[in-house]
Amino acid sequence: MLPIKKILKDPAHAEKLLKTKDPSVSLKGLIDSYNSYTENLTKLERLKEQLNSLSKQIGQKKQSGEDASEIILEVSKMKQSIKDFQSITNEHKETYEASIGTLPNFPDEDIKVSLDPEENVCIKTVGKKREFDFKVKNHLEICQEHKLIDFARGAKISGSGFHVYTGLGAEIEWALLNLMIDIHKKNGFEMRLVPHMVTMKTMYGAGQLPKFATQAFRVHDKDFDHYLIPTAEVALNGLYQDEILSEEDLPKKFMSYSPCFRREAGAHGKNERGLIRVHQFNKVELFAFTKPDESDAMFEKFMSSAEEVLETLGLHYRNMLLVTGDMSFGASKTVDIEVFLPGQNRYYEVSSVSNCREFQARRSKIRFLNKDTGKNEFVHTLNGSGVATARLMVALLENNQNADGTFNIPEALKKYL
């Protein structure tokens, strides 16, 4: 959530910044609803002050034996006015909060302004594309030939967009997860295994609602109203909602394995078959709570740890600094790590690292006591894939295939098999 004071300080600049992420943003409705809320709140507080004054007068008159009936009648009328104003004030507050809850985070001022993902900036390249002297197979062909993944039975039991890892495929998937957990543990991230269903409040705090309601799977019956997590980031962010942390406890660096559930609505290209875009996939997520002046340094630690996974597996990749219009709803800065997939002849994201500044902390009410100022301040939150295994599996199979139809398993992975 954005700070309303920052918006009101320079509405034109705030709207200009937000339009670089979402051109449809308009702040007029938000500002009008906030002004109506504050005006009515002021009137309500004045009425309450008057009520307190009249109540004291009643007590004074009764003590002196005077007739207080007229004031008692006035107090009765004023209580009804207060009740009415309270209802109106609450309505304006709900409208204001609903409006500000739909606004994306401000991008950092130095992020390239564009709505076109093709203008994302390559800031680093590691390794080179492998050159093949034979016809490259895509991962669907390799999986079918070696019986690694059963897409047909996945669709049979759950519908399109689901799959079943089988035999060696299941072992490789689990090996990848264990490799990543070991790398991130070595790099100082503490393990958490989080629930795979969360409340609406937790989804809102992470910035998933209301923006991405249509992209999430909702579990709703008479006893539950929950969402399946689209990423462990949502649950990790919710660990400390409504809490004030100790400065000594920061930063907090976590990693968590979880399946991720996403509707992935919309048309997909012909190349986005198999594991490229699915409704359920596995991921090791990185998440951190930091003091504001430490989040930029933490961002680099996230990048380093995620890159180490790919370097350990010997994969060529590139880092892309996203333009304003390609960043996620809650991010101020995002770098995507992309691997090259020969079967698709293009790069695909396997990790996305974002600094959300205080955006999620405001929505989730996560603060820390600053010893220097003696005041409670919002923490900064960061998240990053460390990494998503579905496309990582594609990268391994397609980049390590041989002319005879076999594929090589990276040395670093063998000890987990």
Image: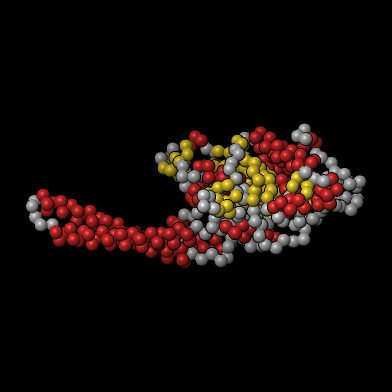
Residue 383 pos. (x, y %) = 60, 46
Q: In which quarter of the image is the C terminus?
A: top right
Q: Which residue is drawn at 63% across and 62% down?
A: 115
- In terms of depth relative to the viewer, which is nearer, 188 or 261? 261
Residue 193 pos. (x, y %) = 60, 39
Q: Quadrant of residue 325?
A: bottom right
- In terms of depth relative to the viewer, which is nearer, 103 or 294? 103
Residue 48 pos. (x, y %) = 27, 56
Q: Which residue is drawn at 58% across and 57% down?
A: 212
Q: Is residue 132 visible?
A: yes
Q: In this view, does 7 lie to the left or right of 192?
A: left
- In terms of depth relative to the viewer, which is nearer, 112 or 192? 192
Extreme-front residue of the structure:
222
Q: Is residue 330 visible?
A: no
Number of disc labels = 0
Q: Quadrant of residue 270?
A: bottom right
Residue 233 pos. (x, y %) = 59, 46
Q: Is residue 266 left or right of residue 401?
A: left
Q: Which residue is drawn at 74% across and 61% down?
A: 269
Q: Is residue 130 left or right of residue 33?
A: right
Extreme-left residue of the structure:
65
Q: Is residue 92 left or right of residue 298?
A: left
Q: Residue at x 23, y 56 (%)?
A: 51
Colour mode of the rendering:
secondary structure
